[in-house]
Image (spheres, rainbow, N blue to C red):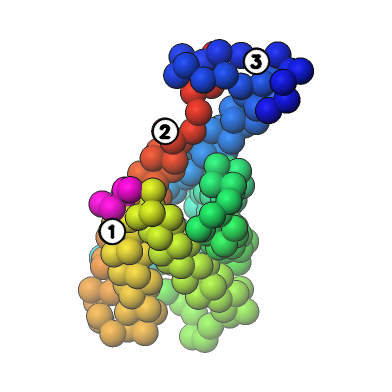
Amino acid sequence: MSGTQPTIPTRAGTVSTPEELTADRVTKSLLGYGVIAGPVYVVTSLAQALLRDGFDLGRHAWSQLALGGPGWVQVTNFVVSGLMTIAAAVGLHRALRTGPAATWSPRLLAVFGLSLIAAGAFPVDPAGGFPVGAPQATAISATAAVHMLAGAIGFPCLAAALLLLARRLSGEGFPRLALACRLVGPLFLVAFLAMASGALGAAGIPVFVVAVIAVFALLSVVFVHRYRQMPNTDG
């Protein structure tokens, strides 16, 4: 902070230059997208799952909601959630600055955001009787293959980002949140692999739904936490 620049007092008793104050406000705004990205994705998906004719939460994957006439809603949900995740990753990089997880955790989170956008752009095939009346796929289409590849890349990146953040959080003195990252990230990835491989049979999709809700809830908590670690910008 230059001694020739005017400083602005904050309620926390610290001072910032106008440039620093503006930068912190931008960072906090970007972190805010990380707080809401998960709830937006989950609530929008669950609402459609309850309202779409023929959709069964126990048998159909949320990705299938992108099919059919109202499928544009889920496509938009994927894309908007992905863009918010990328914005949050930028905010996380600005907030962490240096030290453990400052570089790779935001990058990995951004890749996960890109995978959500790709998943929206490349839908899966009709299966399990949904959408109602649609011809059922007998082979995996090219778009469905890209969709699955997006998950195969994005989900491990999300788990790895959480593990890196766990190291940072532990070093900063937040062991419970660090433990949550160490548990939920890998369990989310295991649930995805179990569903994709069919290892859990009919229980695969419900288990993965629970894992998705858990990992997005944890991301919201992590971004609320990081938001609160930022300097006061109400000055």
| Residue type indicated by callout 3 | Thr
- In-image side of 90 versus 206 (left or right): right
Would residue 36 be counted in the magenta stretch? no
> Is residue 142 depicted above or below 150 in this figure?
below
Magenta stretch bounds: 173-177
Residue under the image location 51 percent in, 20 percent down: 14
Give x and y (percent) for residue 62.
40, 61
Q: Is residue 125 visible?
A: no
**Secondary structure state at the residue bearing disc 2:** helix
Q: Which residue is mark 3?
A: 7
Nearer-the-camera pick, 128 or 195: 195
Q: Between marks 1 and 3, how big is the CA–CA gap?
A: 39 Å
Residue under the image location 61 percent in, 14 percent down: 8
Mark 1, Cα crowd under 10 Å, few <14 / some 14-19 / many 20+, is some
Q: Between marks 2 and 3, how big is the CA–CA gap?
A: 22 Å
Answer yes or no: do the residues labelled 2 and 3 have beta carbons within 8 Å? no
Give x and y (percent) for residue 213.
32, 54
Q: Between marks 1 and 2, how big is the CA–CA gap?
A: 19 Å
Give x and y (percent) for residue 133.
44, 66
Q: Which residue is mark 2?
A: 228
Q: Main secondary structure of the magenta part?
A: helix
